[in-house]
């Protein structure tokens, strides 16, 4: 929680730091609950967040309706809203614009960004990793950091490292434009789906990652059917919209649903992985902290608990407040 709160705060000033607009907008996030068990879980989440400096409050169904007038509090007669946790500082940003803002900022500082070049292996000198093999040739490096999302197990295998990671597809879709403003981000603890409105007025809808581990990037009709059925119980107006685009990516799920950052036990080879569906939210803090680790050789206090060695010592980070990562 402290890590993600730090990342949220970095995002708030990142446009100014990178001198680039990536459509960062504070919207607020509601996690809806439909049972007393879920209400207890949301109360626990809000208290844990508050203890770690992330403002989160419990709200009534009427307060949820005031924040999101389109919400059907009866849940279509099947999922009545009993309440929600609300995080006012939650925000959104355009993924591709964030990537380009970082890339341009890095290039202004002398970093070489090599595009459309596939990593095919790692270069080793004895037990130490000293570079990468690519489709365009070899690149030497004193430190190699693998930050490749769902492909991390494949890359780590070149260094002889086995990671407690499963790769799962994650799907999402957008509708055509909705003529009225839709405030905030609405998520659901039981249905495990979310919805928000893009800058173009389109409705962005997603859900949990696919249950079956896979490297497939194929989108499925079953995902559309399931997500549409769930979200329209809560937001009936979505039934009148059309689906425009659907896409799939792959994400890296760790055994305890928390990130893995730092040394791998192989000299010269580091990883940042295990982000699940939360990697985009972690970009500023993850980059900052891993850069500090590379520069000093020591893990900063904020990410020290997320080392790979925690699995060998049975000190996993199964955080009960991190419901959204499951």
Image (cartoon, rainbow, N blue to C red):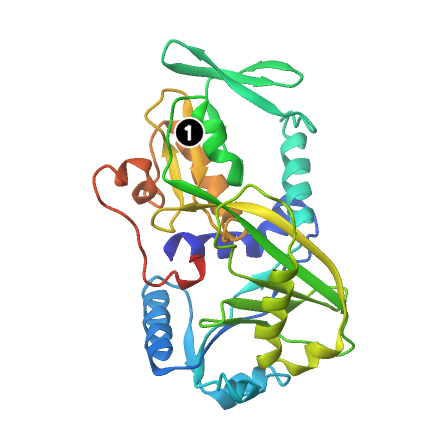
Q: How many marks?
A: 1
Above or below, comparing residue 55 to residue 278 in the picture = below
Task: Give the residue at x 49% y 83%.
Answer: 79
Instruction: Name the quadrant of the N terminus.
Output: bottom left
x then y, percent, for residue 238: 69, 76
Task: Give the residue at x 59% y 50%.
Answer: 14
Q: Is residue 29 left or right of residue 314?
A: right
Q: Is residue 249 left or right of residue 256?
A: right
Q: Nearer the viewer, residue 262 or 161?
A: 161
Residue that label 1 marks? 270
Above or below, comparing residue 12 to residue 136 in the picture = below
x then y, percent, for residue 228: 63, 71
x then y, percent, for residue 38: 37, 76
Disc 1 is placed on an element classified as strand
Task: Give the residue at x 65% y 52%.
Answer: 219
Task: Give the residue at x 38% y 27%.
Answer: 161
Residue 141 in view here: no
Q: Quadrant of residue 128?
A: top left
């Amino acid at each position: 929680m402290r890590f993600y709160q730090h990342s949220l705060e970095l995002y708030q000033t990142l446009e100014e730091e990178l001198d680039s607009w990536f459509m960062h907008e504070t919207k607020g996030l509601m996690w809806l609950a439909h049972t007393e068990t879920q209400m207890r879980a949301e109360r626990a989440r809000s208290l844990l967040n508050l203890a770690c400096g992330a403002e989160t409050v419990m709200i009534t169904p009427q307060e949820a309706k005031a924040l999101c007038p389109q919400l059907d509090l009866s849940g279509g007669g099947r999922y009545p809203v009993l309440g929600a946790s609300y995080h006012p500082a939650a925000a959104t940003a355009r993924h591709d614009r964030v990537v380009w803002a970082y890339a341009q900022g890095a290039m202004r500082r002398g970093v070489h960004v090599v595009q459309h070049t596939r990593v095919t292996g790692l270069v080793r000198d004895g037990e130490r990793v000293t570079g990468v093999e690519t489709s365009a040739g070899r690149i030497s490096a004193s430190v190699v950091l693998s930050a490749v999302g769902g492909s991390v197990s494949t890359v780590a295998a070149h260094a002889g490292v086995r990671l407690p990671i499963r790769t799962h597809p994650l799907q999402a879709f957008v509708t055509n434009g909705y003529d009225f403003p839709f405030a905030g981000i609405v998520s659901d603890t039981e249905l495990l789906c979310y919805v928000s409105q893009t800058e173009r007025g389109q409705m962005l809808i997603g859900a949990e990652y696919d249950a079956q581990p896979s490297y497939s990037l194929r989108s499925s009709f079953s995902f559309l059917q399931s997500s549409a059925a769930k979200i329209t119980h809560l937001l009936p107006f979505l039934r009148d919209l059309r689906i425009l685009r659907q896409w799939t990516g792959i994400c890296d799920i760790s055994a305890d649903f928390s990130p893995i950052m730092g040394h791998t036990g192989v000299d010269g080879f580091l990883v940042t992985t295990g982000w699940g569906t939360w990697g985009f939210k972690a970009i500023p803090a993850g980059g900052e902290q891993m850069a500090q680790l590379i520069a000093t050789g020591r893990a900063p206090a904020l990410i020290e608990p997320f080392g790979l060695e925690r699995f060998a010592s049975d000190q996993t980070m199964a955080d009960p407040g991190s419901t959204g990562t499951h």
